[in-house]
Image (spheres, rainbow, N blue to C red):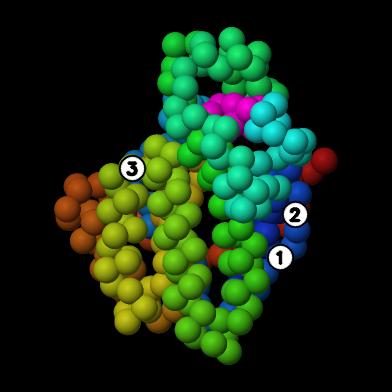
Amino acid sequence: MTSACGKQDRLLQLRCQPGTIEGYIDVPSGYRFYGIDSGISHAVSGADYGTVRTAAFMGLQIITTATEWRGEYLANLTPAEFARFAPSLPQEMTGAEFLERYGGITDTATQVSPERRYPVRQAAQHPVGEQERVDRFAKLLGALTHDPGVGTELGQLMYRSHQSYTACGLSSDGTDRLMELVQAAGPERGLFGAKITGGGSGGTVAVLGTIDAEGVIRDLAARYAAETGRAASVFTGSAPGAAETGVLRR
């Protein structure tokens, strides 16, 4: 969606139901989103992502079976509602146990494997918290130009997003280390927050910083490369999506 429908120097606010664009948000003057490649490949078809995705749909099925809630998407639950429903969700359960009790899931991209153990509660909690973080981030970002102190809260939202992904089992030593390096540098050096992107288990870390912090970003990437022996490419630019450039045709 972002590759096809993105706009230069703007954030795409997306609600994955299954792909609803809620708007485009300007990046405040004086700030930029950087990317640092961890050098670790990831694939959304990998076992880790598939397990977590399946577990989230298992959580959805359990909630709609065990409670009065009948929504189609976990992200439409508020954190308070989820907290009320969470006791009905096991921390983990086997696919065989789930299939025996609940029959199956509504996801068309994955299936429950009887022999696998699934982190049901954490996987179900992630989209609930992530939607709240996205909504809060979008609301705060516009205030950053007039209130630089907002940058700290924006950064904390990014860190919490990364930590939630990590709790699901979708992080990696490389992306964790990059986040730690950004966090250690902090707002004093123009860096406010960082989070893993994409399907997890590797890939690129996104960083919110000032436009003057590019040198700091490159220093951190070089330090990471020296520590790990992995190349750490830095991305600083922004470009329009394929639909805007005419590359994407119906």
Q: What amino acid is at disc 3?
A: Ser
Q: What amino acid is at disc 2?
A: Ile
Q: Which of 146 and 66 is in front in this view?
A: 66
Look at the image and give the residue range highlighted in magenta: 52-62
Q: Residue 21 carries which label?
A: 2
Q: What x and y, as percent, mark residue 195?
A: 43, 56
Q: What amino acid is at disc 1?
A: Tyr
- Residue at 32 percent of width and 51 percent of height: 176
- Residue at 44 percent of width and 66 percent of height: 156
Q: In which quarter of the image is the C terminus?
A: top right
The image quadrant that residue 132 belongs to is: bottom right
88 drawn magenta: no
Could you tell me what secondary structure mostly forms the magenta stretch? helix
Q: Which of 78 and 72 is in front in this view?
A: 78
60 drawn magenta: yes
Label 3 environment density (alpha carbons within 10 Å; few <14, some 14–19, many ≥20): some
Q: What x and y, as percent, mark residue 48?
A: 43, 30
- Residue at 51 percent of width and 36 percent of height: 121
Residue position marked by numbered label 1 in the rendering: 24
Secondary element under disc 3, as helix, strand or loop, is loop
Q: Nearer the viewer, residue 106 or 6?
A: 106
Residue position marked by numbered label 3 in the rendering: 172
- Residue at 20 percent of width and 48 percent of height: 228
Secondary element under disc 2, as helix, strand or loop, is strand
Secondary element under disc 1, as helix, strand or loop, is strand
The image quadrant that residue 244 belongs to is: bottom right
Looking at the image, the residue that sits furthest to the left is: 227
In the displayed structure image, the side of residue 2 where residue 219 appears, left or right: left
Query: How many angstroms separate mark 1 from mark 2 (CA)?
Result: 8 Å
Query: How many angstroms separate mark 1 from mark 3 (CA)?
Result: 30 Å
